Image (spheres, grey):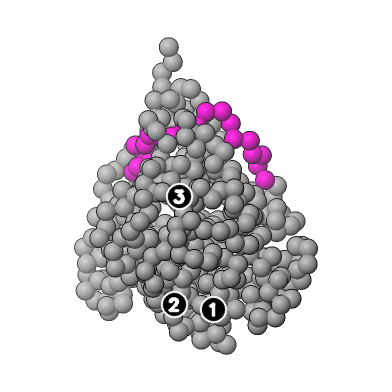
Amino acid sequence: MFKPISRRTLLRGTGVALSLPWLEVMAADKLAEPPLRAAFMFMPNGVRPDHWTPPGDSEQYEITPHLKPLEGLKDDFILLENLWNKNAVGRNGHWPKDPIWLSGGYVQRTTGSDLDVGAISLDQKIAQHLGTLTPLPTLELGIDSPRSGIDTAGGGFARIYGSFISWRDPHTPVPKEIVPQLAFDRLFRNPGPSVTAGLDPSSPAVMKSLQRDDTSVLDLVLEDAKSLRRKGSAADRNKLDEYFESVRSVEQRMEAALRPQKRWINQGKLPMERPAPGIPATHAEHVRLMLDILVLSFWTDSTRVATFMFGDAQTGQDYSFLPGVKGGFHSLSHHLNEAAKMEQYQKVVTWHSEQMAYFLNKVKSIDEGGRSMLDSSMILYGSTLKDGNRHDPENLPLLLAGRGKGTLRPGRRLRAPALTPLCNLHLALLHRMGIQDERFGDSTGVLAGLS
């Protein structure tokens, strides 16, 4: 009879700790059923509205050209309509729209040193409550490197705004990983204390290094902090509060790591080799690898919340690898209703639908105790613009895939009243994750009709 060991058991070497794969002796850590996951998949530069939104207003609808690659998954997603972010209206076409996709905040013009997007993003809000249940609170993936500088021609917004959809607080973007190998390694390689490597685990030196002191770092400096807070300005006090909250969050996660949580253990093996170093040679390979890693992160229960950016606000990615396309996504989105450019723009948007179909089919193919992983997921896909040519922020192109463990009813369209806050959807998703907040962002209530 074997003695159960923790899933968090590590093999320690010099300067690195490698997480063990799932073993039978870890079965004591297993959850009784798969957990609920949430992924937020962002596409820049909008769509061709006439190729996205089906005609009519009934729950049943015809598959439009942009949705054609997803036709086989029609019963697995809800086509959402009439949602928007009001704080995106009348501002720059791109930069302030991206960071509020998951928050609904109001983005301040800035030189880049004092970023302010007005609110925390949905994924990070979930992580505040559930992030200690998994090795990674969240996983942020993307393709483009962050931008720098100020877009003086576009209203004076810092370009960095358009590089992130995940924000830990109104002033702090969460870095996204764009190198497949490094993203892969985050799932399986955890930093370990090299000071104890190679030593007898029962030796006094090791025992002393592993002793826990339950006193919080913040508790130790509390008096000095109070004094500093009294002396500072209102802005200083806000920054101190945000800083202390970040420190406390790290402490809580470290403490949770010492109390291993139950995890979901999938049987068998999800075949994926460690990616080669660097950025893949082609954009298509880059995207597919990152999507595979996202699937793997859910399969291993390394995280239950993830974001993925197909590109930043004005991605310069060249899509000339597609037949009949010549140029970048952003430039083609400004098609000026010219037929040739519109056709190329359509092909680029539809290519992204093909990648989503690849991702959703992969998630759907994974059996978890008699149900699909997609059944235990909520996957939001869409953009911050409806019409890429007009920068239209109303009636955003969105679809919500998965069944949310029985809390979502896919296979139809859901037409909310015109100008319904996108944050109403976010609040509904928060509730499904077990976070019963009354408001989120600029929400006016919970989006009805999802179940």
Q: Earlier in the sequence, mark 3 or mark 2?
A: 2
User: Residue 152: which quarter of the image?
Assistant: bottom right
Which residue in the protein does label 1 denote? 391
User: Considering only vertical position in the picture, is 61 above or below 95?
Assistant: above
Q: Separation of disc 1 and disc 3 at Cα?
A: 29 Å
Write the start and end of the magenta stretch as one range.
254-275
Residue type, mark 3 in image: Pro
Which residue is painted at 58% across and 58% down in the image? 63
Quadrant of residue 90 within the rendered picture: bottom left
Q: Nearer the viewer, residue 82 or 376?
A: 82
Q: Is residue 25 above or below residue 168?
A: above
Label 2 with label 1: CB-CB less than 8 Å: no
Q: Earlier in the sequence, mark 1 or mark 3?
A: 1
Query: What is the spatial separation of the Cα atoms under label 3 and label 2, in whole angstroms?
Result: 28 Å
Is residue 93 inside the magenta stretch?
A: no
Location of mark 2 (residue): 88
Query: Could you tell me residue 27's position as x and y percent?
Result: 43, 25
Q: Provide the secondary structure element on which disc 1 rests.
A: loop
Q: Earlier in the sequence, mark 2 or mark 1?
A: 2
Nearer the observer, 242 or 450: 450
**Distance from Cα at disc 2 to Cα at disc 1:** 10 Å
Q: Name the residue located 39 percent from the left edge and 42 percent from the top edge.
A: 405
